[in-house]
Image (cartoon, grey):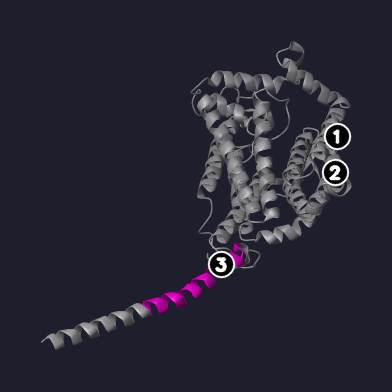
Amino acid sequence: MNTLVRDRLGLGFGAWRLRVAGLFKRSESAAPRRAKAEASATAIPVRDWINVGSAQPARLLGFDQALVWVVVALLALGMVMVFSASVALPDSPKFARYAPTHFLTRHAIQITIAVLAALVVVQIPVSVWEKAAPWVFVAALVLLVLVLVPFIGKVVNNSRRWIPLGVINFQPSELAKLAMAMYAASYMTRKMEARENFVRAVWPMAVALGFTGFLLLREPDMGAFMVIALISMGILFLGGVNGRMFLLSGTVLVGTFMLVIASSPEKRERIFAYLKPWDPEYALGKAYQLTHSLIAFGRGEFFGQGLGSSVEKLHYLPEAHTDFLLAVIGEELGFIGVACVIVAFFWLTRRIFHIGRQSIALDRVFAGLYAQGIGIWFGGQAFINMGVNLGVLPTKGLTLPLMSYGGSAIVMNLVALAIVIRIDVENRQMMRGGRS
């Protein structure tokens, strides 16, 4: 019996030793494999797992849905307010042949065209836009020249800014904003090593901006020139141009604007009217729009007069459905409505900048600078339009992005945002290691 127990214990102990030896052997063989896998994961950068410049369309499963919904909300509110601001226009002899829904119908058609264009653009890889950026800029310059040619450009309110295309009147300055954002981002990407050299880094961009500004001031469209200058200077700053060179460039640009204002009696009067809007000399002249815009905000108070109850839109406030749409929002929806619009544009601008910073962190400099340029465009133009409506800034002919009536502006706004969404899609693909 004792012999049998010892034999079983011996067999058990031997089996236990064999199992332990096997575990050690497996752990010794697994350790080099783990080390090798960790080394390979460290050696291969994330951005090498995916070719974001491929011609295949992205699966748009991962994109910033909040950004899209905010844009949709602004478009929807803009459509409602454009109808409200323009429904009484046929009572005027100038618009007597129009139906009450004329501007609403055209605005809806323009938004449809813009959405279709955005759905096409979002399928194009960002690398294609990076290569095409100089040519897009050249195309914008050609159109800015063509709009100045008699019998091609359409004159409205003493300004030649539109090229009639049947369904919509195309405004080349809107394309120029998008083209400048692309060109400046592409230029800074190519000249990244020359950021400290004024001649190589700033001078070529200054020439491009100067020529664009010359064409815009010939229309004249100083508001668009201000936005384009803001986009280009912002991208130069974010691209890392030397601070002293940036300050010098900004000083020259501000001096140029002051010279343009000083040399134009009409622009000087606008400044005086902005400073003293209630002066009888200006209240019925250059400050007429501003005074009635301020009256609209005053009538709106906190909760507004109610949708459709604006009095100022009844032929008192000119261009209520375009440049001064925010004043109608203030009168009908009150402080609450205006605050919601301001918060929406602030969030939209902040989110676009976040996508741009994310791209730069992933070593996609062109995409990042372009997105931030679009953020400057939307934030800057919205700020200027709101400032004009509220009497904080002198009157300028700039629409409120995504909301005001205007076909080419809506189309270019949605095309610009479609490229930003494409950038976000590619960022998410890269952060997932290329798995879509």
Please tell me which residue lies in front, 136 or 13. Answer: 13
Label 3: how many residues lie within 10 Å, few (<14), some (14-19) or many (20+)? few
User: Marks 2 and 3, how far apart in space?
Assistant: 44 Å
Query: Which one is earlier in the sequence, the residue at label 2 or at label 3?
Result: 3
Secondary element type, mark 2: helix
Q: Which residue is rendered at x = 55% and y = 57% of the image?
A: 428
> Residue 206 bears which disc, if any?
2
Label 1: how many residues lie within 10 Å, few (<14), some (14-19) or many (20+)? few
The amino acid on which the numbered mark 2 sits, given as a three-letter code, is Ala
Residue at the left extreme of this rendering: 1
The amino acid on which the numbered mark 1 sits, given as a three-letter code, is Val
- Tell me how many marks there are: 3
Picture quadrant of residue 250? top right
The magenta region covers: 22-46
Q: Determine whether, in the image, residue 90 is placed left or right of residue 23.
A: right
Q: Which residue is rendered at x = 15% and y = 88% of the image?
A: 3
Question: Which marked residue is nearer to the observer: mark 2 or mark 3?
Answer: 3
x then y, percent, for residue 67: 54, 46
Picture quadrant of residue 387? top right
Residue at the top extreme of this rendering: 280
User: Marks 1 and 3, how far apart in space?
Assistant: 50 Å
x then y, percent, for residue 107: 61, 42
Query: Which one is earlier in the sequence, the residue at label 2 or at label 1?
Result: 2
Q: Which residue is mark 3?
A: 41
User: Marks 2 and 1, how far apart in space?
Assistant: 10 Å
Query: Which one is earlier in the sequence, the residue at label 1 or at label 3?
Result: 3
> Residue 252 bears which disc, if any?
1
Question: Which marked residue is nearer to the observer: mark 1 or mark 3?
Answer: 3
Is 128 within the magenta?
Answer: no
Please tell me which residue lies in front, 371 or 303. Answer: 371
Label 2: how many residues lie within 10 Å, few (<14), some (14-19) or many (20+)? some
Q: Are marks 2 and 1 in contact (CB under 8 Å)?
A: yes
